Amino acid sequence: MSGGRPSTAGWWLVAPALLVIGVFFAVPVAAGLLLAFTDFDVYAIARPDRLRVVGLANWGRLAHDARFWVALRNTAYFVLVGGPLSIAASLAAALLLEARLARAKALFRTIYFLPVVTTLVAVAVVWRDLYHPRHGLLNAALALLGLPAVDWLGDPRWAMPAIILLAVWKNFGFNMVIFVAGLQAIPERLYDAARLDGASAWQRLRHVTLPMLAPTFVFVGVITLIGYFQLFAEPYVMTQGGPANATLSVVLLMYEEGFRWWNMGTGSAIACVLLGIIASSTVLQLRLRTAEAERE
């Protein structure tokens, strides 16, 4: 600050980033919100005069669309089951990497992170072959154990768990790196004091590690929630939303409405609903963490 007036240098520094955010985020969101109040479709592209404002009709259609509720339920199942599993796998891997007896930490950290940087479509194709009911390696392993084969992607009971397993394997490496950074930021003197007090390994984990990782858990939880709500590529490549809509997600339904059936208004309404769900869930997580921190 100079002479009691805030400097404009900071605004000039962040202006390029704000411009990019405005062009590639704010404008599309605003356009999607406006389209949600119209019956915009493929015919309106050639004849804009045919575009009509329909108000809340698109949301009313969604409220009575059984496939939308199925997609919402499937997405919630994926988030509520896959999210915690991914976070737990990430934390477990980070704890193993940061253990005193661990060797070649950099090598294993790289190996665990490789799925994150691998193209999701390629991974989904490979895992689709692994899930093959007759020639897949998973069923071959079950046969060695004397267990019956499972139609992983063809049985509605197993299709979503199969996709969750793929998503956890694909994404846990990213959160693992964040947890590793959080673990390295914990002062070693806290563990030394706990050992002097006779705390066991479990007690050190419960009373030192986990509380000190609370801010990391918040960040990881929010990032994982946002990513998992946008489930699309896995069911699109592996199941096309089947069998019997068992893996139909909200984003996949939005894609079908907007780009397969060209009901852009309905697709935009679905996008707005998803945006509202993600935003409210994120705010809820942050408020719960703030309330917990105040109690502490």
Image (cartoon, rainbow, N blue to C red):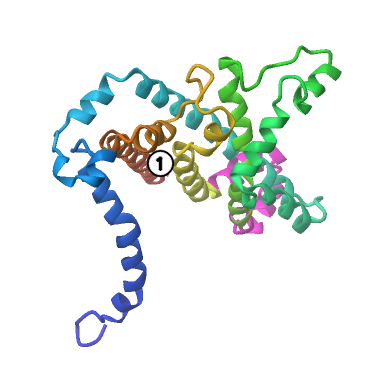
Q: Quadrant of the C terminus?
A: top left
Q: Is residue 133 magenta?
A: no
Q: Which residues are magenta?
A: 182-211
Could you say which quadrant of the image residue 158 lies in? top right
Numbered circles on residues, count = 1
Q: Quadrant of the N terminus?
A: bottom left
Point 40% across, 36% down: residue: 255
Q: Is residue 30 left or right of residue 99?
A: left
- Can residue 225 be seen here? The reply is yes
Q: Position of residue 272 (x, y in %)?
A: 29, 39
| Picture layout, residue 152 above or below residue 36 | above
Disc 1 packing (10 Å; few <14; some 14–19; many ≥20):
few
Point 57% across, 35% down: residue: 237
Q: Is residue 7 left or right of residue 214?
A: left
Q: Residue furthest right?
A: 144
Q: Which residue is mark 1?
A: 292
Q: Is residue 184 magenta?
A: yes
Looking at the rendered structure, the kind of residue marked 1 is Glu
Q: Position of residue 193 (x, y in %)?
A: 66, 52
